[in-house]
Amino acid sequence: MKKTNTLQNLGRLGRWTALALALNLTAGCAPLVLGSAIGGAFMASDRRTSGTQLEDQGIEIKASSRIREAVGESGHVNATSYNRLVLLTGEVASEADRTAVEQAVARVENVQSVVNELAVMGASSLGSRSSDVLIKGKIKASFVDARDMFSNAFKIVVERGDVYLMGLVTEREANRAAELASGVSGVTKVVKVFQLMTEDELARKLPPPRPAAPAASNP
């Protein structure tokens, strides 16, 4: 049977939801997915404002510096920021290092919340990291191929076969993305780290439809 854990954080811009959906992808066992029928409106572009995108880039740069100060070269840590929520993935040598990294990153300017998914273990091998790159590419391709998805709404992080999905999405989109990711070969677990919005909120973000072109008059 599949194991589902739920983590929740509150942020100024909305309700941050980190849903740890542990999908044990054993043969003959279908992925556990929640949600409603697929359909409705989608956006093809990044749903963050341009200012927020720049802030996220700055957060990642500053977080990397703080992480080096906290643990030096003793760990393999990645900090991924989306809409000011920072996801920490990778490996550290001790629980004390895990806590130190989280506290250091939480103090970075503009960071609203931190989801700490660091594992206390030896650093992953080059082979494992290469496999993660391939898995990420396959997931991205599956999002692009899906007719009911806009891949630019999602950020994908993969560590040791564990997949982390970030983005500003509806619950329907979150569940659909987890379903697609869980079907990719090599994926051991899917973790949803989303800021959820309603279908109405998404519809309001969509650009207005283009007016129909006037019909050509007969000579």
Image: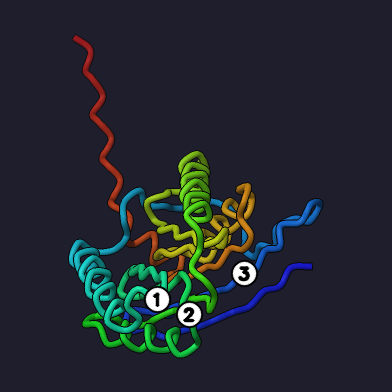
Q: Quadrant of residue 68?
A: bottom left
Q: Residue at x 46, y 42 (%)?
A: 144
The secondary structure type at the circle numbered 3 is strand
Name which residue type carries label 2.
Ala
Residue 106, given in percent of the width and then of the height, sits at 32, 85
Classify residue 10 as left or right of residue 174: left
Q: Residues at badges 2 and 1 in contact (C-beta under 8 Å)?
A: yes
Image location (x, y in percent) of residue 65: 24, 75
**Mark 2 and mark 1: span between their CA atoms?**
7 Å
Q: Please determine whether, in this image, residue 88 is positioned above or below residue 33.
A: below
In-front residue for pair 18/57: 57
In the image, taking residue 142 as reference, residue 76 lies left or right, namely left
For numbered disc 1, what is the local secondary structure?
Answer: loop
* Mark nearer the viewer, 1 or 3: 1
User: Which residue was labeled with disc 3?
Assistant: 21
Please indicate, yes or no, whether residue 148 appears anywhere in the rendered image. Answer: no
| Sequence-first tag of 3 and 2 | 3
Tag of residue 93: 2
Q: Residues within 10 Å of mark 2 (few under 14, many from 20)?
A: some
Gap in Å between the C-alphas at discs 3 and 2?
25 Å
Identify whether 143 is placed above or below 72: above
Q: Earlier in the sequence, mark 2 or mark 1?
A: 1
Q: Inspect the image, locate mark 3, and give the three-letter code of the amino acid beneath it.
A: Leu
Point out the image quarter for the C terminus: top left
Which secondary structure lies at badge 2? loop
* Amino acid found under the numbered disc labelled 1: Ser
**Badge 1 density bin: few <14, some 14–19, many ≥20, Cα 10 Å:** some
- Residue identifier under label 1: 74
Depth check: 195 or 69 in front?
69
Q: Is residue 110 left or right of residue 117?
A: left
